[in-house]
Image (spheres, rainbow, N blue to C red):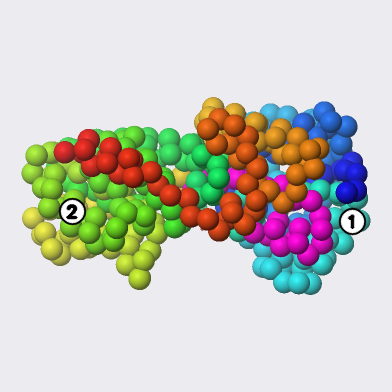
């Protein structure tokens, strides 16, 4: 195993609050250990284009509290090609980068896995996505902040919903995962969450209406995961269905969109990102390669890339029961 003296760090895919805290932790922990740090801008796109510069401890000063990513991010098409990855490897060599830390979601870790397989470069992944859909870690960097952002928005919508006796369908992000929808629904006291993991979407809406929630309440809030199944899904779809099937209800839709991805990271995300950043450097020192570093049951864990990416992370059924019982 060749000795590591310089690492590269990049963020890729959708930005997530806490990514800066992770970059800071990786940078400072590596420098603390006597290594050099090369910052790669715009994710794999910057790696292919050689958009790389050395970071010092000062480079990450004043960043822990900032949302987004100071390294910028991209979804790179070039890196999906064999030639693109060859160029990426050439640039790693030219910059004397011995190992790579990738902060991102599913697609980003899949990129690290391919690069590691093709060019035998040690890669460590950090789970950075608001979706919380990576297997093997309890939460991902950015998830807690996004959850809190959604909760605050829903609290505000509740005020107007109650004033008008309305049903609101609020669409939240999560790609194919319902963590944001399910837990924001519990946190905001919503009446229902429609998530891809729980039975069929149609059943969940029918069940909500059948429970007659609205008869006993001044307003109802249904949190809808953005996930689409068979061309159906999303808040617009459910709102249209209710308008059509139950015209007596006054229905409105809010799609929260990208505001869920921005903002100052929560304390929880900053701490998670800091712990994971330090753990990533320790992992490399311990000879770990091609794993995602996560935290499960408050312990640092190493999850092989293929497990973290490919295995479905289940939603605890207890969360579904909690919401159903408390929304009567
Ligand atoms: O993966 C993070 C995420 O915000 C998803 O929740 C969402 O589906 C997607 O990214 C949106 O991607 P983009 O910013 O490219 O529109």
**Depth-wise, is mark 2 or mark 1 nearer the camera?**
2
Horizontal side of 1 relative to 14 (left or right) equals right
The residue lying at 75 percent from left, 48 percent from top is 289
Which residues make up the magenta segment? 110-131
Local crowd size for mark 2, using a 10 Å CA cut-off: few (<14), some (14–19), many (≥20): few
The x and y percentages for residue 322 are 28, 37
The residue lying at 34 percent from left, 59 percent from top is 234
Kindly indicate the quadrant of the structure image that contains residue 55.
top right
* Of pointers 2 and 1, the one earlier in the residue sequence: 1
The x and y percentages for residue 281 are 76, 37
Quadrant placement of the C terminus = top left
Q: Secondary structure at mark 2?
A: helix
Q: Secondary structure at mark 1?
A: helix
Q: Mark 2 sits on what residue? A: 207
Q: Mark 1 sits on what residue? A: 93
Q: Between residues 108 and 137, which one lies in front from this camera angle?
A: 137
Residue 20, visible in the rendered structure: no
Q: Is residue 117 magenta?
A: yes
Q: Between residues 272 and 234, which one lies in front from this camera angle?
A: 272
């Amino acid at each position: 195993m060749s000795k590591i003296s310089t690492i590269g760090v990049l963020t890729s895919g959708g930005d997530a609050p806490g990514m800066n805290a992770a970059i800071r932790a990786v940078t400072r922990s590596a420098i603390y250990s006597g290594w050099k740090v090369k910052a790669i801008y715009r994710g794999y796109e910057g790696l292919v284009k050689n958009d790389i510069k050395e970071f010092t401890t000062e480079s990450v000063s004043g960043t822990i509290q900032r949302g987004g990513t100071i390294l910028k991010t991209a979804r790179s098409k070039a890196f999906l090609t064999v030639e693109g990855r060859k160029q990426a490897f050439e640039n790693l060599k030219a910059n004397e980068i011995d190992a790579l830390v990738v902060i991102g979601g599913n697609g980003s870790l899949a990129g690290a896995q391919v690069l590691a397989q093709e060019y035998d470069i040690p890669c460590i992944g950090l789970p950075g996505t608001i979706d919380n859909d990576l297997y093997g870690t309890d939460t991902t960097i950015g998830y807690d902040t996004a959850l809190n952002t959604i909760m605050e928005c829903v609290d505000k919508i509740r005020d107007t919903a109650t004033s008008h006796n309305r049903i609101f369908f609020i669409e939240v992000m999560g790609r194919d995962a319902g963590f944001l929808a399910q837990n924001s629904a519990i946190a905001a006291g919503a009446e229902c969450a429609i998530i891809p993991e729980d039975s069929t979407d149609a059943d969940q809406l029918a069940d909500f209406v059948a429970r007659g929630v609205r008869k006993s309440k001044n307003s109802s809030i249904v949190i809808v995961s953005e996930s689409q199944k068979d061309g159906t899904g999303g808040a617009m779809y459910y709102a249209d269905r209710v308008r059509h099937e139950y015209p007596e209800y006054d229905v409105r839709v809010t799609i929260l969109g990208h505001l869920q991805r921005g903002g100052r990271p929560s304390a929880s995300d900053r701490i998670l990102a800091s712990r994971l950043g330090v753990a990533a450097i320790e992992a490399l020192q311990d000879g770990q390669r091609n794993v995602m570093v996560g935290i499960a049951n408050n312990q640092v864990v190493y999850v092989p890339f293929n497990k973290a990416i490919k295995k479905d992370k289940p939603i605890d059924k207890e969360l579904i029961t909690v919401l159903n019982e408390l929304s009567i």
